[in-house]
Image (cartoon, rainbow, N blue to C red):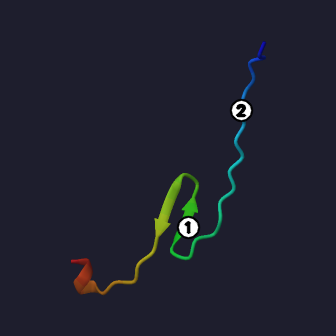
Amino acid sequence: TTIPADIVFIIKDKPHPTFRRDGSDIIYTAKITLKEAC
């Protein structure tokens, strides 16, 4: 017989050179010229 049980996952974020996390959001900062933005 098997006993039903919960499975718990623990996830740890690793720093990323391009993206960063802010809560559930992923943030990317790009340096662009004013011409590229328009």
- For the residues labelled 1 and 2, say whether their Cβ atoms are less than 8 Å apart: no
Helix, strand or loop for disc 1: strand
| Mark 1 or mark 2: whose residue is earlier in sequence | 2
Query: Would you call the spot at circle 2 few (<14 residues within 10 Å), some (14-19), or many (20 or more)?
Result: few
Helix, strand or loop for disc 2: loop
Q: Which labelled disc corresponds to residue 7?
A: 2
**Residue picked out by circle 1:** 20
Q: Position of residue 12 (x, y in %)?
A: 69, 56
- Amino acid type at mark 1: Arg
Q: Quadrant of the N terminus?
A: top right
For discs 1 and 2, the disc positioned in front in the rendered view: 2
Query: Would you call the spot at circle 1 few (<14 residues within 10 Å), some (14-19), or many (20 or more)?
Result: some
| Residue at screen point 25% across, 82% down | 36
| Residue at screen point 78% across, 17% down | 3
- Amino acid type at mark 2: Ile
| Residue at screen point 68% across, 51% down | 11
The CA distance from mark 1 to mark 2 is 28 Å
Nearer the observer, 17 or 28:
17
Q: Taking 22 as reference, is 31 left or right? A: left
